[in-house]
Amino acid sequence: MNLLVSCMGYDGGKSGISAYMRAVVSRLQNQGHTLTLIVEQDAVADFPDCKHITVRRRFAYGAAGFLWHLFALPFYTRRLRYDCLLVLAGNRRYALFSKAPTVGVVHDLSQYRVEGKYDPLRMFYLKKLQPWLVKRFDEIVAISQTTRSDIVKHWQVD
């Protein structure tokens, strides 16, 4: 398959999500898939055997990263032919529309378990907008049974 893979949120291997991204990319390559990765410039060297779409650092995190995925990423799926768009950190990154089927990986919904974890504006986004946006994915992958249960309970997604 020809896959477009969002590795935004990769932090040079410092987090569990980065380790997860490296492992998934390696596994997909070993299975013979053709990958184009969406990464920040400083992550290109960590994925030397892939094609890359590089995103400026200012569009990698926070509101700018969210908006880039929501509005800019879909144009890559329309302009180039991909069999699937895979978003490896799908908790906060969504494509509003995509020509390719989309799969989002959700790592946790800690905002429902840790009181006061985020400020009120972020909590509004996480509890009101995110449940609507996650339904834009054609498929959702939960990394644990707890995350799966939280998705079903809090987002009313099967």
Image: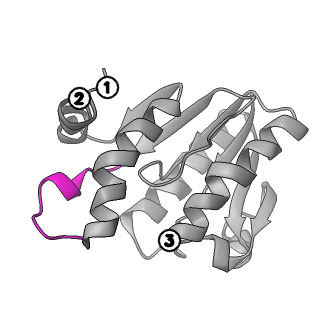
Q: Judge left or right: residue 14 versus residue 112.
A: right
| Labelled pair 2, 1 in contact (Cβ < 8 Å) | yes
Over which residues does the magenta segment extend? 107-118
Q: Nearer the viewer, residue 125 or 49?
A: 125
Residue occupied by mark 3: 62
Tag 1: Cα neighbours inside 10 Å, few (<14), some, or many (≥20)?
A: some
Q: Is residue 59 above or below residue 87?
A: below
Q: Judge left or right: residue 110 versus residue 92.
A: left
* Most common secondary structure along the magenta stretch: loop
Closer to the N terminus: mark 2 or mark 1? 2
Q: Judge left or right: residue 146 versus residue 62.
A: left
- Name which quarter of the figure residue 59 lies in: bottom right
- Where residue 47 appears, as percent x and y from the top left, is 70, 63
The image quadrant where one finds the N terminus is: top right
| Labelled pair 3, 2 in contact (Cβ < 8 Å) | no
- Where residue 156 appears, as percent x and y from the top left, is 26, 27
Q: Which mark is residue 152?
A: 2
Question: Helix, strand, or loop for circle 2?
Answer: helix
**x 84%, y 36%: residue:** 78
Q: Judge left or right: residue 102 versus residue 13.
A: right
Closer to the N terminus: mark 3 or mark 2? 3
| Distance between the alpha carbons at the discs numbered 3 and 1 | 25 Å
Residue occupied by mark 1: 157
